[in-house]
Amino acid sequence: MARLELSNLHAEVAEGDEKILEGVNLEVESGEIHALMGPNGSGKSTTAKVVAGHPAYEVTEGEVLLHLEDDEFDGVEIDEDQRTWDLLDLEPNERAALGIFLGFQYPAEIEGVTMTNFLRTALNAKLEEREELFEEEDDEDETEEEDGFESSPMEGPADEGEIGVAEFQEILQEKMEQLDMDEKFAQRYLNAGFSGGEKKQNEVLQAAILEPSVAVLDEIDSGLDIDRLQDVSNGINALRDEQGTGILQITHYQRILDYVEPDHVHVMLDGQIAKSGGPELAEELEDKGYDWVREEVYGTA
Ligand code: ADP
Ligand code: MG
Ligand code: MG
């Protein structure tokens, strides 16, 4: 169990002084589904990127904390003083190792890398980073062996503690069944020729493999036809139901929330969360747009 806590988060563009986030307060716990809605330009994507550690933004005030709520994390025993992490002090890959997943709106194409290899590399990188994080905190200065036989991360035999090709195949197969995905998918080259919908499904598959505590999905519903929307939604629900991932679902439209039912709905306006509620709030937004929230909050449209 983990809880991601944003408090009074202020952020601006790193190169410049344009303020974007002006005091965001939000908590997402493992197993919960939150929808973050709001008009274009209100700061939804910036919130996601700041949580992930995107260098384009500078945090000027507030906190982003991750609370690990058990005495173990991913099956590893942790100490009392390793329960709370100040994410703003950590690199993006360290945040990922602690279980924060950010799906990108448009994942990059990388030539010559199959999905399988990409995912195995990502998982091993996460596991290695996690080990280092908790070791560092433990103050166990283990010197790394230099035997000169470093294997290629993509092809070679597994290093000690790494998940090897065969073991990974089993993990992948299980996850793909969970997500009801076609096996052939994994053999394809990363994103090359993937349709918009397939890219979104890959995003969900990545999250299934990495088993994050909290996944931030930014407009994963954009440009999907109804069948794909349903597939992707089933996948998101499986992340929550099968591995207890907390979901922060950023969306402009209410439509996906018919399939991925949120526990909490938040409306972002001008860099703040202006209103929160249950699923009924999303329907109200669908009917009435965002202006009434603005009126309620500011007294004017
Ligand atoms: P949303 O995802 O809600 O549509 P964003 O978080 O992408 O909104 O953007 C919020 C505001 O911040 C917009 O006015 C946008 O133009 C501005 N903004 C975001 N990122 C940058 C950036 N890197 N440089 C300059 N302005 C930015
Ligand atoms: Mg600045
Ligand atoms: Mg956005």
Image: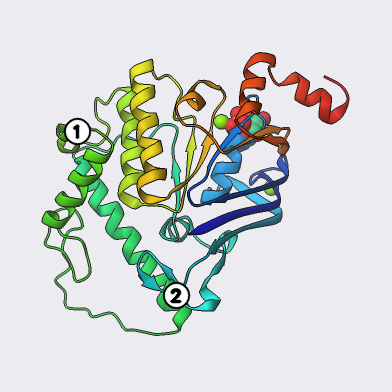
Does any portion of residue 240 appear in the rendered image? yes
Image coordinates of residue 136 in percent, x first then y, are: 44, 77
**Which quarter of the rendering shows the C terminus?**
top right
Of callouts 1 and 2, the N-terminal one: 2
For disc 2, the marked residue is: 78
197 or 296, which is in the foreground? 296
Kindly identify which numbered label has been placed on residue 32: none
Residue shown at 67% from the left, 35% from the top:
277
Number of disc labels: 2
Q: The residue tagged with tag 2: helix, strand or loop?
A: loop
**Viewer-proximal residue, 236 or 225?**
236
Q: Where on the picture, by quarter, is residue 231?
A: top left
- Residue type at tag 2: Ile
Amino acid type of the residue tagged 1 in the rendering: Phe
Image check: 12 left or right of 65?
Answer: right
Q: Position of residue 107 (x, y in %)?
A: 37, 35
Residue 264 at x, y percent in the picture? 60, 38
Image height check: is 179 above or below 70? Answer: above
Residue 37 drawn above or below residue 12: above
- Label 1 sits on residue: 185
